Image: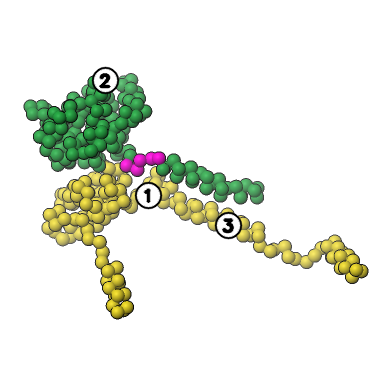
Chain colours: A yellow, B green
Amino acid sequence: MRRLLSLAVAVALLASPAAAVNPDEQLADPALEARALKLSKALRCVVCQNQSIDDSDATLARDLRIILRERILAGDTDKQAVDHLVARYGSFVQLDPPMRLDTMALWFGPLAVLLVGGIGAAVYMRGRSPARAGALTPDEEAELAEMLKSEEAR
Amino acid sequence: MRRLLFILPVLGFVVLLGVFFAGLGRDPRALPSAFIGKPLPAFATAPVRPGDQGLANTDFDRGEPVLLNVFASWCGPCRVEHPVLMRLRQQGVTIHGLDWKETAPAGLKWLTDQGDPYTRVGNDESGRTGIEFGVAGVPETFVIDKKGKVRYRHVGALTPDDWERKIGPLMEQLRKES
């Protein structure tokens, strides 16, 4: 029973969410449709913001899927088709942000934080290490002897 | 020096806190248009009012700053902003309208019932004209300068506050531009 249940869970986890692309939108040529599908997974639905146009049921997402397919059918390369939408909605439509001067903070910010944090942590750890447990100086030696002597005298 | 090193992470944290706090009050939908500083793409639309000439991109470089309001009768926030548009019209602000994703008769009924604040108004039944200049939904209002270039994009209902704080002063400034 238990085994059957875990199998059922495993199979359920395998299921991928159905795409929102409707049959009437799909291109007849499977190769072109595959390209369109791949591109639409990387384009943001500007209404819902955190879904791709492939995932979204918004009417605008549908419009953008159709426009994307029109461009591909018209012979656009992948880049040209994406640029067509970027020209209208800005690079916000790309779920994968392009590397540009104004997106540098996005790309390298986390790395910079990690680096600064790492250096800070390293400096802190070094300051704490028991590196000064060396031999006593003659002065300290004398002081220690003094202390021990007074201890004995008691 | 040592003390400075301790203060540094705290300082960084405070800066981040500030950035995030400022972000809380921002509307995530309010994205700048990809057309800021550029003219609208070429388009021509059918009229909403029978016998009228619709709206085209050539209606925008007539030597005065204008508003381009994208609306639809099925849109709730459009109902909210409509009285504001009517008042602006009375104050002499030129507003052009694009009736988005509905039939022209539906748009006409809206204008007949609610009042018509538009100088020119075109129908965009498929929504493709709006998409050409990056409309993501209704209502959206674009500020277009004397030369027909997009200067500002407002997403969502236009409130009196939006007009007084941002768009009104911007229109005033654009009016002074040569």
Query: Mark 1 falls on what kind of element?
Result: loop
Q: Position of residue A121 (x, y in %)?
A: 58, 57
Tell me the chain of label 3. A
Does residue A19 appear to the left or right of A94 in the view shown? left
Question: Are tags 1 and 3 found on a single chain?
Answer: yes
Q: Residue at x 90, y 68 (%)?
A: A154
Snapshot quadrant of residue B31:
top left
Q: For marks 3 and 2, give the one nearer the viewer.
A: 2
Q: Residues within 10 Å of mark 1 (few under 14, many from 20)?
A: few
Q: CA distance from mark 3 to mark 2?
A: 63 Å
Name the disc covering residue B91, or none.
2
A79 w.r.t. B131: above or below: below
Separation of marks 2 and 1 at Cα, in angstroms? 46 Å
Q: Main secondary structure of the magenta part?
A: loop
Q: Which residue is mark 3?
A: A121
Q: Residue A99 shows which numbered tag? A: 1
Residue A131 badge: none
* Amino acid at the residue labelled 3: Ala
Seen from the viewer's position, the closer of residues B20 and B59 is B20
- Give the alpha-carbon distance from disc 1 to disc 3, as whole Å: 30 Å
Residue A147 shows in this picture: yes
Callout 2: residue from which chain?
B
**Residue type of the residue flagged with mark 1:** Met
The correct choice, above or below, for B157 with respect to A102 in the image is: above
Which residue is rendered at x = 28% and y = 52% of the image? Answer: A51
For the magenta stretch, what is the residue range?
B25-29
Q: Quadrant of residue B99?
A: top left
Asked if labels 3 and 2 share a chain, the reply is no
